[in-house]
Amino acid sequence: MTGMTGMTGMTGMTGIAGMTRRDVVRHTAVLGTVALAGGGSLLALPTAASAAGRSGPDGTPGRPTSPNGWEVEERANDVSTVWTRRIPGTPCDLDVRLGDVATVLTHVVRRFHYEIDELRAGDLTGWRAPSRVRLDRPEGNQASGTAVAIRPGSYPPGARGGFFPVQLAVVRDILAECDGVVRWAGDEDRPYEALFSIDVSPGDERLTKLVARLRGWADDPGAGPGTPVDVTDKRRRRAAEALERRQKSA
């Protein structure tokens, strides 16, 4: 897919007054906020919502969990399952849950980098403190280190249509390649097109199988992120469309 002509250039396409598609989305969101404020109704700042954790073996309340069922972490890089890791092939660091989750989200980010648009340092937001996110929304998954927002300033919450069709086809192909283990918040009623989350609970065998496949590709120079992928292939498109229908109906 890295050989796909003009993919990165597509994101730089200019429209009216030299604005990119992302600029249009971002400025539209800002104008909407200003309009609401001007009408006397200020937007409420997001607040943390308590999430019921899984019960312990003795029936006592467990630790709070993110929407996808993973325990949240109060901090990163200190007595935590969340640590900062460099994404190979990019200048980006990511605060992410170690182990299988990190393997999957790293794959998602690398394909985005190679096939949609080249990332720069600071373009990723992974783990966020539970007090800084709504645990009743998809971005609450960031509190457990199981989600990544890719260029959240370019694809703000509530805005839809930030990707060109050819870029969206890559997003759909990435999701299908992950066999439903990853969910894209662009499909939510309140879209957040920057956000990709693990969509299975801890211990789910689908996660284990996907990770085994991804790690196998690491030993094959002809597989994995950075190798050519034809997202228009009929078989891949059918898989992507089937997963899209399934996840949208969930």
Image: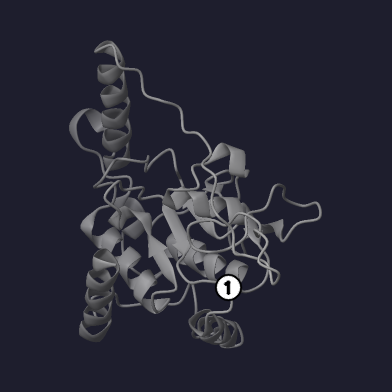
Q: Check disc 1: other Cα within 10 Å, few if <14, some if 14-19, many if 20+.
A: some
Q: How is the image coloured?
A: one colour
- Number of marks present in the image shown: 1
* Residue 126 visible, this angle: no
- The image quadrant of residue 42 is top left
Residue at image x 45%, y 77%? 227
Residue 168 placement, left or right of 95: left
Q: Which of 35 and 120 is in front in this view?
A: 35
- The image quadrant of residue 232 is bottom left
In this rendering, is residue 37 above or below 225?
above
What residue is shown with label 1?
202
Q: Which amino acid does label 1 sit on?
A: Pro
Query: Circle 1 — which element?
Result: loop
- The image quadrant of residue 184 is bottom left
Residue at image x 21%, y 58%? 165
Residue 96 placement, left or right of 111: right
Q: Position of residue 127 (x, y in %)?
A: 60, 50
* Residue 73 visible, this angle: yes
Q: Position of residue 181 (x, y in %)?
A: 44, 73
